Image: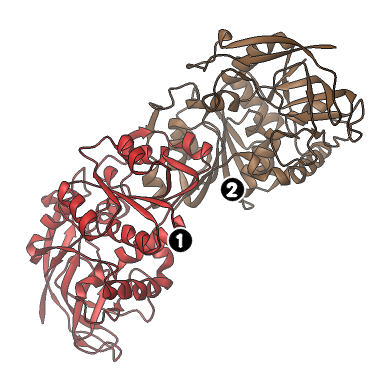
Chain colours: A brown, B red
């Protein structure tokens, strides 16, 4: 018998999620049946969508998230003991699951991609859902061309930091917006962004006009709100906007959400295309992204950084810290 | 010698255009040279884009607009005296021009399409730029499927009234928003919209939830602003938004434009696609639209209505009336 713990959301979030919205539930896992595996969690992910999707699920629900674990016991010969698996089983320390034969659903459990010696934690970061989000969300929707100017908000986050580096790999000029001077330094000095601004301390419109005097061709929007309206006003004809998230609004009331300068005049006069996406749309193709991302990391073209919190008991704090922008790079928790 | 008059914009508009922003300039036209034609204007168009594009041109400039006229004198054998031509020569009563050999530029002069006996004024309305705008902007960007639910704002305008009828022809359910009860009556009773609301007197969100209980698949946006934010919040996964105009914002300061609830959360979670366009993008294909539109008008599937103002001296009033939404159908001026 294995004792397992998991975070259950027992109350819908109001504004910023509160510690009391969660309950840690302990239980004894049953012995595994045919086709099942017992997994011990190694790494758990905290991501903005865990806030944003809260209203979609009736409480109580088990807090979902991507996580990496190791098979401890197996009645599925394809997943022998010691196999590392990625699943969407969330904030728990052990679970019993049935691995998916395919990777076609977010609810499937799949083998950690071959990371060629890199940390298994990348399976919930640069070579996991966030990596696929950056890869497909940028390449498929922005369709960047060499020499174009790309703007990324949330640039120091798990997704944004990868988008900017992919844009550099594709020969674009990359301008980022992030929320602290340390993040700005990291993105400019270590990741090779052409120009990064601390959006909290600059005049975004002025900064953009200086850094992108010829206008913006592609915008990868992680944040929504007024900064996005300003960036979109600076776009060139036929510019493309990939709308990945709107973290600036996630803790606001969904119905009476925040207001910002309207986008329609820019959309019309510049003939812009905006498209939102959820990365599961391309789930059949994730392995394609994982192969490229792994190759770029190994060649040094793509740098990854993890913001690690230790301990199952600290997942809530890690989550709130990520929502407050405390992380540089991918926020994860070591269990 | 022909005496000609034209409206010149001598001062950039601030807010609502003022009569003093225009000057009527009289001149004697020179005799025509080889390749030129002398045209007497019959119909002049007043459209929202004449407000919106004001900031693009340094003053003074001749007020542009589409217009229909008759060739009075010709040194181009392809355009003999009596030929009706459509041009973008604007608010004037006579002009000398060089007809374009093609229709590839907004600045070209082209022969009025074969309207099969319909009023030549349709050449600046349902079988002119506004018709092409409705046709391509809706069909190419919304890509409507039979049975889908389509919402149109500015539904009683030159473009909106045609979009809704094309949507009906394509087998969609059509919901409109317009600015008076008379317009609502006309759209529901005469044009066959499934449901139309006076946006000034209803709770848009509530009205929409009742009229489109299964959500909105396509939205043709003529207005921008809060009503568009509400409609976009009611869209279904993979919904498409054709952004044609934002008349609600045209008289506002361009930099400090109006604010509305942000669109990004809906765009992401519903994976929406929004695209703005200017109809000249499809100028090579306008004849294709004109053929279909003429066919639909002749068969009775497409009804047109014109809001006619009489007299060259009243163009300014017609323009301001159109911006205030006084027109039902296409606002035009008979010269």
Left or right: residue B59 compared with residue B3: right
Residue B99: horizontal and vertical position, in percent?
A: 30, 80
Report x, y in % for residue B140. Answer: 45, 61
The secondary element bearing badge 2 is classed as helix
For the residue pair B258 and B210, the one nearer the viewer reads as B210
* Same chain shared by disc 1 and disc 2: no
Classify residue A257 as left or right of residue B300: right
| Along the viewing direction, whichever of B245 and A170 lies nearer the viewer | B245
Q: How crowded is mark 2: few (under 14 residues within 10 Å), some or many (20 or more)?
A: many
- Residue sitting at x 74%, y 43%: A289
Residue lying at 58% horizontally and 32% vertically, measured from the top left: A196
Q: Which mark is residue A48?
A: none
Which residue does the image show at 85% across and 24% down from the upper left?
Answer: A70
Q: Distance between the residues labelled 1 and 2?
A: 18 Å
**In the drawing, does residue A254 fall left or right of residue B153?**
right
| Image height of A174 relative to B43, above or below | above
Q: Which disc is residue A141 wearing?
A: 2
Residue B41, horizontal then vertical, whole percent? 16, 74
Residue to which mark 1 is pinned: B140
Q: What element carries label 1?
A: helix
Quadrant in which the C terminus of chain B is drawn: bottom left
| Residue B107 appears in the picture as rendered | yes
Give the percent coordinates (x, y) of residue B320. Answer: 15, 52
Nearer-the-camera pick, B59 or A335:
A335
Q: Quadrant of residue A95?
A: top right
Quadrant of the image occupied by residue A54: top right
Q: Which chain carries label 1?
A: B
Q: Which chain carries label 2?
A: A
- Is the N terminus of chain B in the top left, top right, bottom left or bottom right quadrant? bottom left
CA neighbours of label 1 inside 10 A, class few (<14), some (14 to 19), many (20+): few
């Amino acid at each position: 018998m294995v004792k397992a713990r998991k975070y259950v959301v027992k109350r819908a979030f109001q504004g910023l999620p509160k510690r009391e919205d969660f309950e840690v539930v302990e239980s004894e896992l049953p012995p595994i049946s045919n086709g099942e595996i017992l997994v011990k969690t190694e790494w758990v992910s905290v991501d903005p969508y865990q806030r944003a999707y809260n209203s979609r699920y009736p409480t109580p629900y088990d807090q979902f998230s991507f996580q990496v674990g190791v098979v401890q016991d197996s009645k599925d010969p394809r997943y022998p003991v010691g196999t590392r698996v990625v699943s969407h089983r969330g904030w728990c320390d052990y679970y019993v699951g049935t691995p998916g034969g395919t990777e076609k659903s977010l609810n499937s459990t799949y083998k950690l991609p071959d990371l060629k010696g890199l940390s298994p934690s990348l399976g919930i970061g640069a070579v996991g859902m966030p990596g696929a989000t950056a890869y497909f969300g940028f390449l498929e929707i922005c369709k960047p061309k060499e020499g174009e100017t790309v703007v990324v908000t949330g640039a120091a986050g798990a997704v944004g930091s990868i988008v900017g580096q992919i844009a550099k790999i594709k020969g674009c000029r990359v301008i980022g917006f992030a929320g602290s001077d340390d993040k700005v330094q990291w993105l400019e000095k270590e990741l090779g962004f052409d120009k990064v601004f601390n959006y909290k301390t600059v005049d975004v419109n002025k900064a953009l006009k200086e850094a992108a005097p010829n206008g913006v061709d592609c915008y990868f929007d992680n944040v929504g709100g007024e900064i996005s309206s300003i960036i979109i006003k600076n776009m060139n004809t036929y510019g493309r906007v990939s709308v990945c998230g709107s973290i600036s609004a996630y803790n606001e009331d969904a119905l009476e959400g925040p207001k910002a300068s309207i986008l329609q005049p820019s959309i019309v006069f510049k003939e812009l295309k905006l498209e939102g996406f959820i990365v599961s749309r391309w789930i059949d193709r994730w392995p394609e992204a994982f192969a490229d991302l792994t190759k770029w990391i190994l060649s040094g073209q793509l740098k990854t950084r993890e913001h690690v919190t230790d301990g199952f008991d600290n997942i809530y704090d890690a989550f709130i810290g990520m929502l407050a922008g405390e992380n540089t790079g991918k926020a994860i928790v070591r269990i």
